[in-house]
Image (cartoon, rainbow, N blue to C red):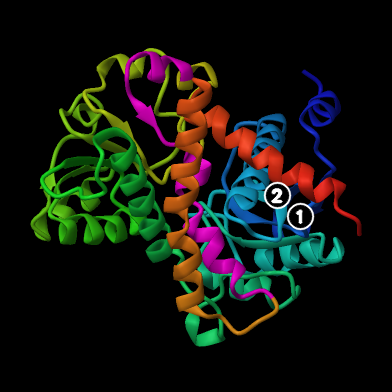
């Protein structure tokens, strides 16, 4: 499918391109929808195989941000940035400053923050050339690392799923298998262990697996996590882990994790429901991070207010599951339906 045809079909408003050969920068910003307010979404630093692949990725991710922000109750539309570079070997301060000028050139239609491959320090360098950036370190007046709020939001979504499936929010005694041992998983595990859960983790990075072991966490090999017998499977690494083939290995009742775009294709949501597995839509589950950074915009960051907002992920997930049960549709379809209702209300409200 041609890019412009795809944008028209999916309702995208804008795709902007910025190159700066002097610093090796090739970048894109996609703005999907601004009905609720300026687009808010992270900038991913990732070396795609081709420009076409990068463009399709940033377009797809920007639409997901529209739905995520709408469900989170934020006054922001959806956007996403992407820098085509290897974050480990090619990222430079000059590149970040140039990218900041790109963000600034859009005049506030898009507000950026960190994503895969980017850090709070990178946001500081971007902030040298644009005012439209959040996710700055605490010492710079920002909200700092959003992982704590993201992990808290995932925990709230798990509680809502438990209430729907098992009739109680208490997760004590439940086994949770986590794929990916990063900052979000670490924050999530703190809540799960306090609740009395048995936690099992894995990561493709052996160093991270060893770190988890040193902290007394049960660790399994990466290839065995999908088939591990558990109550809740929590994908917290990169996306695409759930395919029509891979879900045949699952031995869980709930899937609820922080990874973006967990479904390899939309059909997987229905296949999971047919298999009796409750899949919590990732763009609702992992909204704690964007909620956190949104509390920097136009105000002094208030962590308590951000935490209160993130706790409402429980209420939104419960509402989505109620719609799903009532209409006999997947939770993903129900979440899309609820987000579209919010966008439609915004579209018809007088300006």
| Residue 23 figure quarter | bottom right
Q: In the image, residue 261 lies at what x, y percent?
A: 51, 35
Please name the residue that numbered disc 1 is placed on. Answer: 36
Residue shown at the point (51%, 78%) measured from the top left: 137
Confirm whether residue 308 shows in the render.
yes
Helix, strand or loop status at disc 2: strand
Above/below status of 322 relative to 313:
above
In this orientation, which residue lies closer to the viewer: 337 or 217?
A: 337
**Is 259 on the left-hand or right-hand side of 22?**
left
Does 25 lie within the magenta span? no
Picture quadrant where residue 337 is located? top right
Provide residue 241's location: percent of width, then percent of height.
40, 29
**Quadrant location, the N terminus:** top right
331, above or below 182, in the image:
above
**Could you give the CA–CA distance between mark 2 and mark 1, rounded to whole angstroms?**
9 Å
Locate residue 37, reporting x and y percent: 78, 59
Is residue 204 or residue 269 the one in the foreground? 269
Task: Give me the residue at 17% from left, 54% from top.
Answer: 212
- Estimate how packed mark 1 is, as few (under 14), some (14 to 19) or many (20 or more) residues with alpha carbons within 10 Å: many
User: Which residue appears at 56% of the width and 59% of the height?
Assistant: 290
Residue 281 inside the magenta-drawn segment: yes
Task: In the displayed orientation, state which residue is furthest to the right.
Answer: 351
- Give the quadrant of the C terminus: bottom right
- Picture coordinates of residue 236, whole percent (x, y): 36, 44
* Residue picked out by circle 2: 78
- The span picked out in magenta is 270-297
Relative to 278, 46 lies left or right: right
Assess whether mark 1 and mark 2 are in contact (beta carbons under 8 angstroms): no
Does any portion of residue 17 appear in the rendered image?
A: no
Left or right of 119 in this view: 160? left
Q: Earlier in the sequence, mark 2 or mark 1?
A: 1
Q: Residues within 10 Å of mark 2 (few under 14, many from 20)?
A: many
């Amino acid at each position: 499918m041609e890019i412009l045809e795809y944008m028209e079909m999916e309702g995208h408003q804008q795709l902007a391109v910025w190159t700066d050969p002097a610093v090796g920068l090739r970048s894109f910003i996609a703005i999907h929808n601004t009905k609720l307010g300026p687009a808010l979404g992270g900038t991913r630093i990732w070396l795609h195989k081709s420009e076409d692949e990068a463009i399709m990725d940033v377009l797809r991710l920007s639409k997901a941000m529209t739905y995520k922000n709408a469900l989170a109750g934020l006054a922001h539309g959806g956007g996403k940035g992407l820098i085509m570079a290897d974050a480990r070997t090619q990222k430079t301060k000059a590149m970040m400053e140039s990218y900041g000028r790109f963000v600034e050139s859009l005049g506030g239609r898009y507000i950026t923050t960190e994503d895969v491959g980017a850090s709070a320090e990178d946001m500081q360098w971007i902030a040298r050339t644009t005012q439209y950036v959040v996710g700055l370190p605490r010492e710079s007046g920002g909200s700092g690392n959003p992982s704590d709020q993201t992990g808290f939001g995932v925990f709230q979504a798990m509680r809502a799923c438990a209430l729907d499936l098992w009739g109680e929010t208490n997760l004590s005694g439940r086994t949770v298998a986590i794929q990916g041992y990063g900052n979000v998983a670490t924050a999530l595990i703190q809540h799960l262990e306090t609740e009395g859960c048995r936690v099992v983790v894995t990561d493709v990075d052996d160093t991270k697996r060893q770190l988890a072991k040193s902290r007394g966490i049960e660790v399994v090999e990466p290839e065995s996590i999908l088939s591990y017998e558990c109550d809740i499977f929590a994908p917290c690494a990169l996306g695409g882990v759930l395919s029509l083939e891979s879900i045949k290995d699952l031995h869980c009742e709930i899937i609820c994790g922080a990874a973006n775009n967990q479904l390899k294709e939309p059909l997987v949501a229905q296949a999971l429901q047919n298999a009796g597995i409750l899949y919590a839509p990732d763009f609702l589950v992992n909204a704690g991070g964007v909620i956190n950074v949104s509390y920097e915009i136009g105000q002094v960051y208030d962590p308590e207010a951000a935490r209160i907002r993130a706790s409402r992920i429980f209420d939104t997930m419960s509402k989505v599951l109620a719609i799903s049960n009532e209409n006999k549709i997947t939770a993903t379809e129900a979440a899309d339906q609820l987000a579209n209702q919010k966008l439609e209300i915004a579209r018809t409200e007088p300006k």
